[in-house]
Image: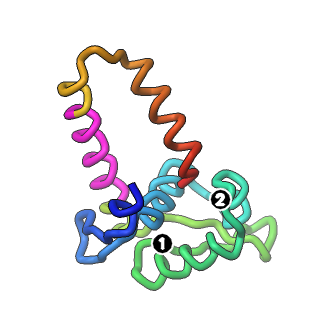
Amino acid sequence: MNSYGSTPRRYGTDDLLYMTEVHLLDRIGKTIGSSVTELANATGKTKGAIAQTVDKLVAKGLLRKTPDPADVRRKFLLLTESGKIVFETHREKDHKAFGRYRERLPEYSEDDFAKCADIIGNIFKL
């Protein structure tokens, strides 16, 4: 898993992205209006680690920061059009991979796969 996660890949754009970057984009895409603090709390990562990844994704043009009208210190994180392409491509790849696993492992139920995904998600948090 470490080898897979440490190899950058393309997800529908010219950008090479690491697994942590793609998973952060995925989380932001699922939760519109996330902030660095909320992402840090949800993933168990430090705010500094999340902020560094966010800054890389902003520099790549995949994320943008928008001020919260209720609190100028807080920034909402939103996917750009390119970020949405990465988000959708990643979800499609995950869906295809899940289908391949289901075909190769017919003895396991949907609940088994859901439980496995939950465990892996908790292990890697991102």
Rendering coords of residue 17 (x, y %): 35, 71
Which mark lies nearer to you, 1 or 2? 2
Compared to residue 45, the image places residue 106 above or below, namely above
How crowded is the residue under tag 2: few (<14 C-alpha within 10 Å), some, or many (20+)?
many
Q: Position of residue 28 (x, y in %)?
A: 53, 57
Q: Residue 78, image x and y in percent?
A: 52, 65
Q: Quadrant of the N terminus?
A: bottom left
User: Is the residue 79 above or below the residue 91 in the image?
Assistant: below
User: Which label is found at residue 114?
Assistant: none
The 10 Å Cα crowd at callout 1, few under 14, some 14 to 19, many 20 or more, is: many
- Distance of mark 1 from mark 2, alpha carbons? 14 Å
Kindly identify the residue that appears in the image at 58 percent across and 43 percent down.
Answer: 122
Q: Quadrant of residue 40?
A: bottom right
- Left or right relative to 63: residue 68: right
Q: Nearer the viewer, residue 101 or 84?
A: 101
Residue to which mark 1 is pinned: 63
Q: Which residues are magenta?
A: 87-100
Instruction: Classify residue 51 by image quadrant.
Output: bottom right
Q: Helix, strand, or loop for circle 1?
A: strand
Residue 61 horizontal/vertical position (percent): 41, 79
How many dots with numbers? 2
Residue kind at label 1, given as amino acid type: Leu
Q: Which residue is mark 2?
A: 39
Q: Is residue 30 magenta?
A: no
Residue 96 magenta: yes
